[in-house]
Every structure is written in C-alpha cells, then in structure tokens.
Image (spheres, rainbow, N blue to C red):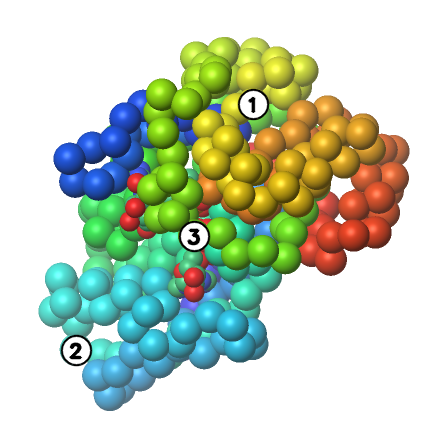
Amino acid sequence: MKIYEKAPAKINLILDVLRRREDGFHEVEMIMTMVDLADRLEMEPLSRDQIIISSQVGYIPLDEKNLAFQAAQLIKERYGVKQGVYIHLDKKIPVAAGLAGGSSDAAATLRGLNRLWQLGISERELCELGAELGSDVPFCVTGGTALATGRGERLERIANPPQCWVVLAKPPINVSTADVYGRFRVNKVDKHPSAAAMRAALEEGSFAGMCASLGNVLEQVTLNMHPEVRQLKESMIRLGADGVLMSGSGPTVFGLVSKEAKLSRIYNGLRGYCKEVYVVRMLT
Ligand SMILES: C[C@@](CO)(OP(=O)(O)O)[C@H](O)COP(=O)(O)OP(=O)(O)OC[C@H]1O[C@@H](n2ccc(N)nc2=O)[C@H](O)[C@@H]1O
Ligand SMILES: Nc1ncnc2c1ncn2[C@@H]1O[C@H](COP(=O)(O)OP(=O)(O)O)[C@@H](O)[C@H]1O
C-alpha cells in the first residue's frame, strides 16, 4: 500500500525576535500561514528495516541529513517500528528559501508514517516529535495559521488570512538560517512588527490591515548581506503588489495581491531577472 502526503510551504506574515536565549536559539514571535506551493511525498512500507529516500531533484541530501529521513528514524525509534519505508520526495518548494520546505517534508513524513503504520499518535505528540527535528516542524505538522512563540514550537491557532494571491520570488542565492540568526542584533531593530495588529487584521478579514501589519526583523540582516533581495522587494512594490515582505530568514520575497488583473504585470516584471517566480494562493 502506498500513501501520499502534501507538504506545503509556509510564509511568515510577522517575524519578530525578542532575545537570544542561553541555548543559542532566539525567542521569537511569528505569525505563519501556508501557501499552495507544495512538495508531494509518496510512502511505501518495506519489509526490511531500512529507510530509503529518493527525489527527482539532485540538490538535496538523500541520506540521514534529509529531514524526512530524520523524521522516519525518530518515529521508528520512539515507537519501536521494525518495518522500513521508502519515501519519494517530489520537490516543488525551493530549497533553503525561507519557505520551510525541509521542515514541511519532515512534518508530512510524521503525519504519513502515523497513518501508514497505524500508530495512533496524537497531533500534539507529533508536534513534540517535530520540535526535536526543527523549530518550524511543529507548525508544519498542524498547518493552518498560527502565532508561534518560544523558538517557534509553541503554537496558538489564529484566524486564517483573507483570500488573496501570493507571488513568491526566490533570488538565486543561498541563505543559511543559522548564519542570519547569528548576525542578528536585537538592539539594531528600528521597529518591531506588531503581532497584535496582524492578529486583529486577520480576525477582521482585512486585506489592507494585513498588508499594513507585515514585518520581519530578519530582513535587516539578509537585505544588508544581499542587496539583490532589497532590489527584489522594491521591484515587487513598484510592480504593484499590495504588501511585500521577505519570508523567514530569506531570501524568498513574497507579495500579497488582491486583484488578479495585477498578476501578469508583476509576474512578467519579476521574471525578467528572477528565474524562480511562483503565483500561488493562501492555503486557507
Ligand atoms: C527563520 C525561520 C522562520 O520561520 O524559518 P526559515 O527561514 O528557516 O524558513 C525559523 O525560525 C527557522 O526554523 P528552522 O529552519 O526549523 O530552524 P532550526 O533548524 O530549528 O534551527 C536552525 C538554526 O537557526 C537558529 N535559530 C532557529 C530558530 C530560533 N528560534 N532561533 C535560532 O537562533 C539556530 O542557530 C539554529 O541552529
Ligand atoms: N527534505 C528536504 N528538502 C529540502 N532541503 C532539505 C531536506 N532535508 C534536508 N534539507 C537541507 O535543509 C537545508 C534547509 O532547507 P529548507 O528546509 O528548504 O530551508 P528553509 O527552511 O530556509 O526554507 C538545506 O540546506 C537542505 O540541504
């Protein structure tokens, strides 16, 4: 029997960093939601006790460095599963992009193997397992729209954003999340975004309020390191996106757009110099 799981990308509508913790992680306040750009995972049981990962792309690790592999290993160890599994990752989410592709694959693996091996693990326990794999994995387990605190693993579900178009543009540069957090200085933040304002906008279903409340304090690090990300932001605004922000630690920039008629101008304008541009919907 084969089973399938979708692993959607996330965007951060708000990303605030409050302080650096003793354990090296940062205390954050984020509002995250999912968009309709997803990897697709196919899982099949193996009688021999082995985890095999494959993918149609050659630029991700397929061994124990792969987050889906780590998720399968963790669930096998914790629940004493002696069966193996073959997992194929049909990658659609750009890698190291600030869109949590690897975290979402890990979360989809946890959900999928819970079904495949009929383990009866609750969503809460899956989130706890996910937190051992990465700060964004618990959110990717639950999906929806959430306020994430702690290092990102404490979740409170909040209202979904009003429906709109999301244009994602990933410049051809690699950004390491650890490096961006490492360079971040809380005393250099000009303006902290307001999670309360974003939350209120979402509750009211206000598209304008959502656009006005976007904010990500990690932009100051990534935009200074990579001026092309700043240019991309400026281009998206100039081309008519209603709200524009970098997602996570970057380098992907997303634009929120309410009117379909604006999309082709934005898409074509960006495609002129950015190869990876996607037009998707919020996954609400
Ligand atoms: C910045 C965000 C925003 O959603 O996403 P991405 O840009 O990676 O998508 C997340 O906080 C990333 O979460 P995730 O990618 O799961 O990070 P982890 O694997 O847990 O941590 C990678 C490294 O980032 C740093 N880190 C991560 C989370 C956090 N709250 N504080 C940190 O300082 C640590 O140096 C850690 O070693
Ligand atoms: N299943 C996976 N898909 C993508 N990248 C993965 C995966 N497993 C491990 N990685 C590694 O994780 C790193 C971060 O990838 P990703 O999760 O796409 O980043 P981000 O959270 O910034 O969007 C990459 O360097 C990649 O090699």
For marks 1 and 3, give the CA distance: 22 Å
Can you say whether 140 is above or below 66 in the image? above
Question: Could you say which quadrant of the image residue 117 lies in?
Answer: bottom left
Label 3: state its secondary structure: loop
The residue to which callout 1 is attached is 214
Label 1: state its secondary structure: loop
* Residue found 25% across the figure and 31% down from its top: 20
Can you say whether 83 is above or below 106 in the image? below
**Mark 3 touching mark 2, by CB under 8 A?**
no
Query: Position of 19 compared to 270: left or right?
Result: left
* Residue found 34% across the figure and 42% down from its top: 182
Label 3 within 8 A of ligand 2 by Cβ: yes
> On the rendered image, what quadrant is the N terminus found in?
bottom left
Q: Nearer the viewer, residue 95 or 219?
A: 219
Q: Nearer the viewer, residue 73 or 152?
A: 152
Mark 3 or 2, which is nearer the eye? 3
Check disc 1 and give the amino acid type.
Answer: Leu
The residue to which callout 2 is attached is 82
The residue to which callout 3 is attached is 176
Residue 32 visible here: no
